[in-house]
Amino acid sequence: MDQLKLLNYYKMISNFANNLIGAFVSLIILQATGQLVYAVIYLVCVNTLRLIFTISLKRITSKYPQLCLLLRIVPITLYNVFIFILDINLIIGVIGVCIFVALDAALNYLPKEIIFNYSSLSQSQKSDKSIGITRLFEQTGIIVAMIVGGLLLDFNKTLVLILALGIYTLSVIPLVIYYIRCKNEKTFNKDATSNAIITLKRKENTKTATQKITKKILFTYAIIYFSFAFMDLLQTSFGLYVFLCKGEFALAGIINAIFNSFYAIGFYVASAINEKKDTTKLVSILCLVMAAVVVFLPFVNVDTMFIVICLIYGIIGFSYPFLSLFVLDRMLTKSRIMACSNDALFMRESGCIAAYIVGYSFGFIGLVAIFITIGISMASSSMIIPAGEESTRKNIVDFLQNNEITQRTRKPQQKEG
């Protein structure tokens, strides 16, 4: 079995295991403290630590992404243990949860994307289709975990912990076995490049220019992801709102499962459309649609207007993948040409985490402020995304044409070590 299929298996099973409790950590802290401000402090601190860990572990996650996923067992176990310590010592419990949730995220998100970057290079299918399929598997695990985890947490936290650790271990074993079998291959865990960039980097007069254009592209994508990653705050923020209203994990889990269901469907549809058509204008329109509906969520009564909440969540969940797929597919294509796809994924992760830190900071004003911030960011993204994509496209085309080697540029391949 190839690595992409193993990755999809891992994503589905591990996301189920990790989200049984992981998706509800901020709600558990809110329940333990009884104060929204502590949940917001936790969210800001955990993402700050996540950014620090992500930067510190960059070299390791790029070189040994499969082993990073195996090492997740340690922080997953420890942050679950500290969740139980919350009932004994609140301060130690929150600090422990914060540190190990952040470490787990650093060992999870970037390594998964790097493995996808490596493994999708060898696939005959188009990259946007590969992204659509892998996200479908990813969301399936989250959807089931949101429902099952929400119900079980109201019943027995210990049972959820045991299930999460056991299932996660089963999910990562095939990837680790694959790593052991293939680690000595020359192209294994190597970044993509192209003949054009190899040629340019060997010439002294073009080496500096190549580095300059690469940095410009990486910075542009960091800004693009920062602009629309605020939407990732939606599920946690609205989950806190629902928990404040109802005091139940189950309802928050069900509502977020609805979002992820539409998100999975949206990714599948978006991958089919993106494969055949230019979706630039559609992406801008959907940014504005999401900006318009997200600000209404905290003003909708959970008891009497549950259908309206589901409708809004459905619109956002279905629309959001069009943005994510559009940007990721084009970023990977361009960064592979410039031999910097892993760096691009790192800048993507850093831009997103920076948005989380800024976005959750508005929670000190109130949850409504977070929703307004999300709305403003999505409206801005309707202009930033197409402008950034056109800028990066033009920079690469002009750069290659000016150096008169576009005719020798081939499909990116994995470099030999």
Image (tube, helix red, strand yellow):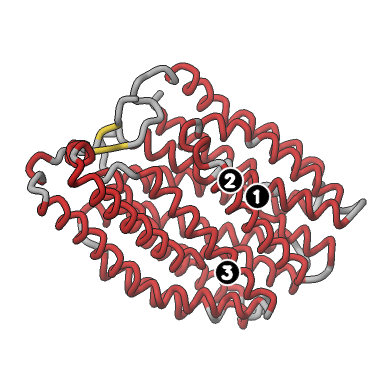
**Label 3 is placed on what type of residue?**
Val
Which residue is pictured at 80% across the width and 49% down the height? Answer: 83
Look at 42% across and 43% down and name the residue there: 134
Disc 2 marks which residue?
106
Relative horizontal placement of residue 187, taking residue 265 as reference (left or right): left
Measured as percent of width and height from the top left, residue 92 is found at 85, 52
Q: As drawn, which residue projects farthest toward the right?
A: 88
Give the mark nearest the N terminus, 2 or 3. 2
User: Does residue 322 appear in this view?
Assistant: no
Q: Are marks 2 and 1 in contact (CB under 8 Å)?
A: yes
Q: Is residue 114 above or below residue 241?
A: above
Residue 176 pos. (x, y %): 53, 24
State left or right for residue 39 relative to residue 49. right
Rendered image: mark on residue 358: 3
Q: CA distance from mark 3 to mark 1?
A: 16 Å
The image quadrant that residue 357 belongs to is bottom right
* Inter-mark Cα distance, 2 to 3: 18 Å
Q: Is residue 155 visible?
A: yes
Q: Residue at x 63, y 37 (%)?
A: 72
Q: Secondary structure at mark 1?
A: helix
Give x and y (percent) for residue 154: 79, 54
Which quadrant of the rendered structure holds the C terminus?
A: top left
Left/right placement of residue 34 relative to residue 328 reads right
Q: Amino acid at mark 1?
A: Ala
Q: Which residue is mark 1?
A: 102
